[in-house]
Image (spheres, helix red, strand yellow):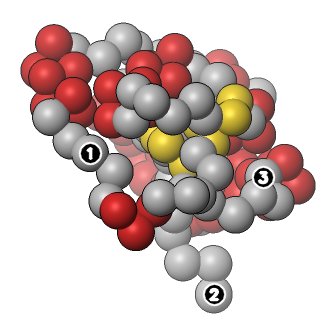
Amino acid sequence: MPLTALARRTLAALQPPPALDGFAWVTSPLARARETARLIAPDIVPTIEPALIEAAWGDWEGVALHALRLRHGDAFTAMEAQGLDFLPPGGESPRMVQARWHRGWPRSGPPAARPSRSRTRRDTS
């Protein structure tokens, strides 16, 4: 999904905090992530990191969560309760995404934009 006009205006008004000066900037290859980086820090050229692409939803790609909940009912609720091991058919679990990120993104520095709709930020303990 592309950024909205409101998102573009909001992002263009932001500036990276001075504490991040000198850090390497990294972003997902998604167009909206690259655009987010450019709008926030137009003078910084981030490294494109394929490992930061958002989770693959397989057979459910592009289907809204509320639609999946309606379609699959309690079965979907039970799948969601699996947390990091929630695995859409033909897709990736949050745990798989975390492993991909750790393998492909060993750099230090903040990502310029994070993948959306990701569940990988959950506590892994």
Q: Mark 3 vs mark 2: which is more N-terminal?
A: 3
Distance of mark 2 from mark 1, alpha carbons? 34 Å
Image side of residue 89 versus residue 72, left or right: right
Q: Which residue is mark 3?
A: 105
In the image, residue 32 sits, relative to residue 70, either above or below, namely above
In the image, residue 101 sits, relative to residue 66, either above or below, namely below
> Callout 1, which amino acid?
Gln
Q: How many marks?
A: 3
Q: Which of label 2 and label 1 is nearer to you? A: 1
Q: Mark 2 vs mark 1: which is more N-terminal?
A: 1
Residue 7: percent from left, percent from top: 19, 25
Q: Which residue is mark 1?
A: 15
Q: Which of label 3 and label 1 is nearer to you? A: 1
Outermost residue, bottom direction? 125
For the point 22% across and 20% down, which residue is it?
8
For the point 60% across and 34% down, which residue is it?
46
Please give the label number shown on residue 31: none
Is disc 1 placed on a helix, strand or loop? loop
> Callout 2, which amino acid?
Ser
Question: Is residue 68 visible from the viewing direction of this image?
Answer: no
Q: Which residue is mark 2?
A: 125
Image side of residue 109 versus residue 37, left or right: right
